[in-house]
C-alpha cells in the first residue's frame, strides 16, 4: 500500500494530513513523522510519513469493519 500511495499522493497533501492529525504544527514547520522539510516540500522518509498519515487509519478502519 505504501509504494502505491507514494506515487499517487503529493508530499504537501501528506503533510496537510499530518497537520490534521496533530503530528505537525503546520505545513511550514519542519519535523514530524518522516522528517518533513518545508523548504524542499519533501520527507526524509516517505514510508514513515505515509504510515502515520494514512496506513494506520486504513488499518484501524479495516479492523473496525471486520468485527
Image: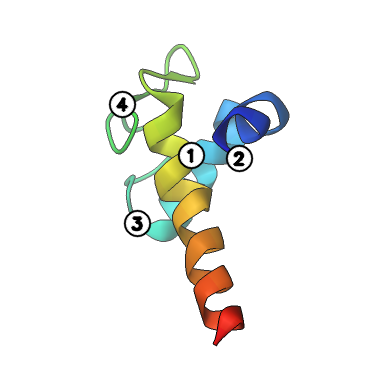
Direction bottom: furthest residue: 67
First-in-chain label (2 vs 3): 2
On screen, residue 25 above or below 10: below
Give residue 11's quadrant in the image.
Answer: top right
Badge nearest the viewer, 1 or 4: 1
Q: CA distance from mark 4 to mark 2?
A: 20 Å
Count of numbered marks: 4
> Which residue is located at x 41 percent, y 58 percent?
21
On screen, residue 66 above or below 42: below
Residue corresponding to mark 3: 22
On screen, residue 58 above or below 52: below
Residue 67 visible, this angle: yes
> Which residue is located at x 34 percent, y 30 percent?
34
Disc 3 packing (10 Å; few <14; some 14–19; many ≥20): few
Secondary structure under badge 1? Answer: helix
Judged left or right of residue 66, residue 45 is left
Q: CA distance from mark 1 to mark 4?
A: 11 Å
Q: CA distance from mark 1 to mark 2?
A: 10 Å
Q: CA distance from mark 2 to mark 3?
A: 23 Å
Judged left or right of residue 15, residue 4 is right
- Find out whether the residues at labels 2 and 3 contact each other: C-beta distance under 8 Å: no
Residue corresponding to mark 4: 35
In percent of width and height, residue 15 lies at: 48, 38
The quadrant of the picture occupied by the C terminus is: bottom right
Mark linked to residue 1: 2
Residue 28 visible, this angle: no
Amino acid at each position: 500500500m505504501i509504494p502505491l500511495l507514494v506515487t499517487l499522493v503529493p508530499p504537501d497533501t501528506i503533510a496537510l494530513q499530518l497537520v490534521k492529525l496533530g503530528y505537525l504544527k503546520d505545513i511550514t514547520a519542519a519535523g514530524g513523522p518522516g522528517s518533513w522539510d518545508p523548504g524542499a516540500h519533501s520527507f526524509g522518509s516517505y514510508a514513515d510519513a505515509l504510515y502515520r498519515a494514512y496506513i494506520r487509519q486504513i488499518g484501524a478502519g479495516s479492523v473496525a469493519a471486520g468485527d
